[in-house]
Image (spheres, rainbow, N blue to C red):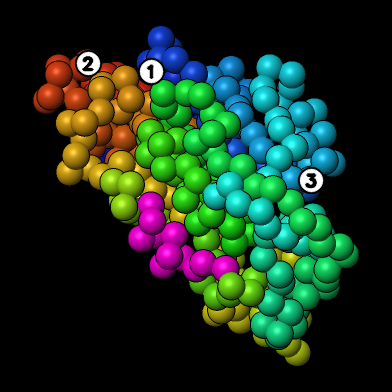
Amino acid sequence: MAAQLETDFSFYDVVPELSALVIVDVGAQPLKNQPEIYAPLVEIGKAEIVAFEANAEGCSQLTEVLGAAHSVREIIIGDGSPATFHRNKSPVTNSLFPANMALLSRFSGLAEMSTLVSSENVQTYRLDDLIDLPEIDFLKMDVQGGELNVLNGASRVAGSAMAIHTEVEFVPLYIGQPLFADIDIKVRSLDFQFHTLSGPTGRVYKPLQRAGSDPTGVHQYLWSDAVYIPDLSKLERHSAERILKLCAILHDIYHSFDLVLHLLLYLKDREDVGVYGDYCKKLGLI
């Protein structure tokens, strides 16, 4: 099936009766001039956000962006144990792990962002103890090396999601942090499979300098976001509604139209759910 796809629409235009997505965002510090990946769903009123952020200013910014209908809490999510929280020059680099300055100083601009300003003893909290929901739809994590700690305190919450979006590092930007391989093992143990990388990012080694996002000469990838979906060999575990919610995530956030088609055809064959044809028409395939 080959065609020029028409993709400028929401999955909710195809299935308007589908309920809003419950999205849990851990480490929700907004980035300048970069909307949250779920912003399109918020704009159309099809997302309910429960966000956690350790930085008070970040909480205020996110509350202003999202509005009072969503929950934003200033709290540090982890495995429930006491920890040391490191506040750095740039809040986006704050972490439960100390910055690996020996490595960061090899790259242009990274060490300056991660210079330690202060550290404090804190209590971390488990998602499983804070979220009293039978299931969520989407879990997003960006906590600068602490993602495995979050997952270790969120087996119930994370396991109920239909997609997990987590920052991962390929090299130790923070001392003692888990890397991509460690996160991958944990998420797959919850019956998820890897889907895609979103925004793999690198930096140039010194003395070379590169302004902005120019990728020329950059071969050292440092971090990315990794996206996981439920194990497709075990789809029978999930209701049609839950699979349709996965389709909404895949379409509106990741533009994974091929996988949406695959899942809708599966639902058509399994339960005669009549969305496949409507989606094909909307894509311009028929």
Tell me residue 57's x, y (percent).
Answer: 84, 41
Residue corresponding to mark 3: 55
Q: Which mark is residue 274?
A: 2
Q: Which mark is residue 114?
A: none
Element type where label 1 sits in the image = helix
The residue positioned 59% from the left and 73% from the top of the image is 176
Residue 49 falls in which quadrant of the image? Answer: top right
* Whole-number angstrom distance, CA of label 2 to CA of label 1: 11 Å
Magenta range is: 177-187
Element type where label 3 sits in the image = loop
Residue corresponding to mark 1: 14
Residue furthest front as drawn: 82
158 sits left or right of 62 in the view: left
The residue positioned 67% from the left and 25% from the top of the image is 71
225 sits left or right of 278 in the view: right
* Whole-number angstrom distance, CA of label 1 to CA of label 3: 38 Å
Q: Are marks 1 and 3 in contact (CB under 8 Å)?
A: no
